[in-house]
Image (spheres, rainbow, N blue to C red):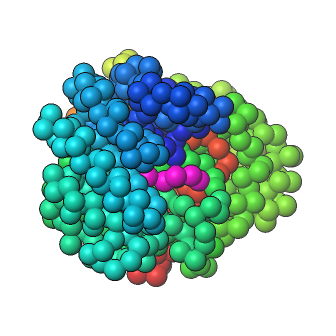
Amino acid sequence: MNIGINSFGLAKNLTSDFRGTLKSLKEAGVNYLEPCLVFDKEMGLLGHLISSGLKKRGLSGGIFMEDEAQDKIRLVRESGINVLSAHLFLTALKPETLSKIADKAIIFAKENKIEAYVLSFGRPDKKLALKFLEAWREPVQKMTEAGIKVLFHNHGADLEGKEGETIFHTFLEGMPYMGAELDVGWVMASGKDPLEIMKKYAPRIQILHFKDIKDLKKKSSEKDYFVPAGEGVIPLDQILLASKELPLLKQGLVLDQDRSDGDFLFDTYLSAQNLQKGAKTSLKIRKEASLKDGKEYSILTFPLLRDTFKGKISYFAFLPFLKAAGLSQVDLLIPEIKHYGVEKTLKALKDNELHVGCLIAYLDLYKLKGKKLDQAFLTSLKLCQNVQASYLMVVPKKIFSLRKNKASFEEIRSRYILGFRRGVELAEKFGITVCFEDTPSIEIPLSSSSDCLAILKEVKGLKLVFDTGNMLPALEKPLDFYEATKEYICRVHLKETIYMEKGDLCLDGRRMQATCFGCGDSDMKVLIQAMEKDKLPVCKTIEFVMPVNSSLASYQGLLSRFVIYLNNLSQS
């Protein structure tokens, strides 16, 4: 799916970090940028005053002024995001403005491969609209004859009144050569049904703007009026279905959130995910973001480690969100707890009614032998006991170096069996269960169910942490893996995956990455139902993925998304 975004809401982000924002947009799944373009020189003194004002307000990054627009478009395209349409910003200030800039706009479009320009009016003044209609006819026709599409973008005021008499209808009827960029959020704000408007003007609509509104009773000036697409009042699923009948351009689905009451880039990520998956993982009402099925849930928090090292977020500030979400445990890596401090971490967890369910250790079971192996296990087991965790999950260290050394699977497996056997023996004295996870690496024999069973059957007391996505590199279906290994499972790592250009290598040459719940290629619902049918009495751990933007609000939003998705599964 091709997803675009208008630059207006991004203005402050683009001003403060142009390249970084583009990178985040690309990571979020955005393919096109629709910049707001101002030909300020052609507008004389008014253009100069506008340019100066935008710079003072820190908005110049998202409003492309004439002198810098070409360079900015080049940078956007170099980031992997294309520019095919642009909003001719502020042309509604005076009726004659469009005529003044038309010739320059045509030259600019041809030089920069702009296929479509967008105009807007946005005022409930029918008489003034008629003046603009008369003034716009000639320049719009001139652009159209030059091979440039011109589209009318609606605001709420443009659709007020009786159908057939609205300002939106007046412009489209008065200029039959003009197309439409329909903003579905503003349609809702006008009191109209976007699906009905889409049906009525279907032949003219070439771009859809996805704006969403939290509550239509609020005023548009309120801080939390706008929300990510799919999180508010618009019927996103139905709009996406109806959009298939429209003559949309390549960049036909464009996000247009004017502002955010949180993290704008995270909102963009949510919007893009909702469009791609039809809102089935939408946050919707955040007060619902608390687990409701009464079962034990934990979370892997190691993705936070990178951003805590950089000082961007605080691990301890995140813990209250876990409590509010209904989680009872955390799964911690030893590097995490060493970084945060054992005593400080335990106190913070206790204050938030949480505890460590599983401690995760990296131990080189291929290399370690004898006393060194015992010492490594004992150090990890003592720490596990200190943090009051019942499980020690062992991850083989330096797993990618083994195949480079041409070690056979049989040799690797035999050393793992010896290592795990010794670990289980030592753990008995501590009352701790040793376990390992199926891994996403095809470089070692721990990805498929047959590989894992070959070790589990040889080591009495050893248990398995079932990762719901890590068998995919071995080309095994998650449900098949579960059915084959369920008698050994002591914990579950809930993870969804998607095939991307980068990630863990699969046997068929594809690469796999973790993604948000509901956004992956596997069917989490089937797995959850299978485990519930078997009454699998184990804790399920949310395997977190890093959000696009490093902020506490982003992590909180992503957690809410996971929780609501799990609630929806348990209710279905």
In the rendered structure, the answer to whether residue 357 lies left or right of residue 101 reads right
Q: Which residue is nearer to you in this view: 524 or 418? A: 524
* Place of residue 134 in the rendered image (x, y in percent of width and height, measured from the top left): 28, 52
Residue 257 is a magenta residue: yes
Residue 78 image position (x, y, % from top left):
35, 23
- Reply above or below: 66 against 227: above
Residue at left 47%, top 46%? 93
- Residue 411 higher or lower than 514, as above or below: above
Q: Nearer the viewer, residue 284 or 143?
A: 143
Instruction: Tell me residue 40's x, y (percent).
Output: 46, 29
Q: Please report the bounds of the magenta region as a residue range.
A: 256-260
Residue 310 versus residue 406 in the image, above or below: below
Residue found 37% across the figure and 26% down from its top:
73
Seen at 51% across and 66% down, the residue is 213
The C terminus lies in quadrant: bottom left
Q: Residue at x 20, y 48 (%)?
A: 249
Closer to the camera in the image, 17 or 63: 63
**Residue 430 in sight:** no
Q: Relative to 198, is 97 on the left or the right?
A: right
- The x, y position of residue 247, in whole percent, is 15, 56
Quadrant position of residue 236: bottom left
